[in-house]
Amino acid sequence: MTVVIGFEGSANKIGIGIIRDGEVLSNPRRTYITPPGQGFMPSDTARHHRAVVLTVLKEALEQAGLKPADIDCVSYTKGPGMGAPLVTVALVARTVAQLWGKPLLGVNHCIGHIEMGRLITKANNPTVLYVSGGNTQVIAYSERRYRIFGETIDIAVGNCLDRFARVIKISNDPSPGYNIEQMAKKGSQYVELPYTVKGMDVSFSGILSYIEETLFSMLVEITERAMAHCGSQEVLIVGGVGCNMRLQEMMGVMCKEREAKLFATDERFCIDNGAMIAQAGWEMFRSGQVTELEDSWITQRYRTDEVEVTWRAD
């Protein structure tokens, strides 16, 4: 059996998870929460991660009932993400790998979301809608790459929701998007808003003053187009915004009309976590990949389709 530990810290959440042959052994996480009306600065976020990372690491090992000797590989988020938090977590992962004498593996954050979603939901070969604070992409697998069929041309959907929450001083605890969703459930009037779909891409910056229902309609439309292009009968929603039940409901209506299946996970695995990095690392390590110490840098820009998917045979 292969055991991989994963370190995630690309934004305001730091998580460390342990995977053993598809089983999540532990997945503790901490979130840096700022006051209402404020976002999170990279330096402050990195400071938070430095303060708690060793505590989270201890929790991960204790919850899994493992010792460092039981770990086969140490994986970490290489990117994309915020520079200072990424560096903080990468340094810890590099140090741990050297102290424990284990191979190191840098993981693409987006690939982590996809592979975790595939593991938990058992989706076979889905069209993937990846929606988070920093990314909005429609993705499908083809010829050893996760190909991007459509994406935002300005800001990510999660960033749009976060910025809207800051404008009207919605609490950041547990997250702005969650609190917007709860408020929207009480609404009864649909307000017509700018709807900007450009081919397979979307634009959210002009809609920032208005928000949720129209954003999700745009995402459902471009996902359906990708499904039609790929001949896909499965949709997998990943990323922090993927927890939103209204988005899942709207996507479910589209899937039902197409006689397709919808797959999604809950906040344990949708929101950034260490287990998703461990799972992607597990797949990569088992296919023969490792990251040499001199190559174990981070990058804020690391596109999903840059990664060669060596672990999928289909």
Image: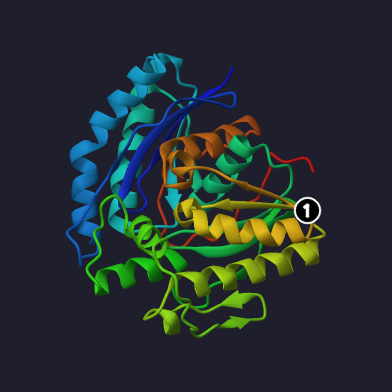
**Nearest to the observer: residue 242 or residue 143:** 242
Q: Nearer the viewer, residue 28 or 219?
A: 219
Chosen colour scheme: rainbow
Looking at the rendered structure, the number of numbered marks drawn on it comes to 1
The residue that appears at 54% across and 60% down in the rendered structure is: 247
Closer to the camera in the image, 47 or 308: 47
Residue under the image location 69 percent in, 62 percent down: 254
Where in the figure is residue 292, as x and y percent of width and height?
48, 39
Quarter of the image where the N terminus is located: top right
Near mark 1 (Cα within 10 A), the count class, few <14, some 14-19 or many ≥20, is: some
SS for dot 1? loop
Residue 75, position as x, y percentages in the image: 46, 36
Residue 165 in the figure: left or right of residue 231: left
| 145 w.r.t. 289: above or below | below
Question: For residue 64, what is the image quadrant?
Answer: top left
- Furthest toward the front, the residue is 188
User: Which of these two is toward me, 84 or 223?
Assistant: 223
Residue depicted at x 34% and y 66%? 162
Q: Position of residue 160 (x, y in %)?
A: 40, 71
* Vertical arrangement, residue 16 with respect to residue 152, above or below: above
Mark 1: which amino acid? Answer: Gln
Which quarter of the rendering shows the C terminus?
Answer: top right
Q: Quadrant of residue 29?
A: top left
* Image position of 233 (left or right of 311): right
Q: Say left or right for 19 vs 258.
A: left
Image quadrant of residue 156? bottom left
Residue beneath disc 1:
233
Q: Is 240 drawn above or below residue 134 in the view shown?
A: above
Residue 40 in the image: state x and y as whole percent: 24, 60
23 sits to left or right of 165: right
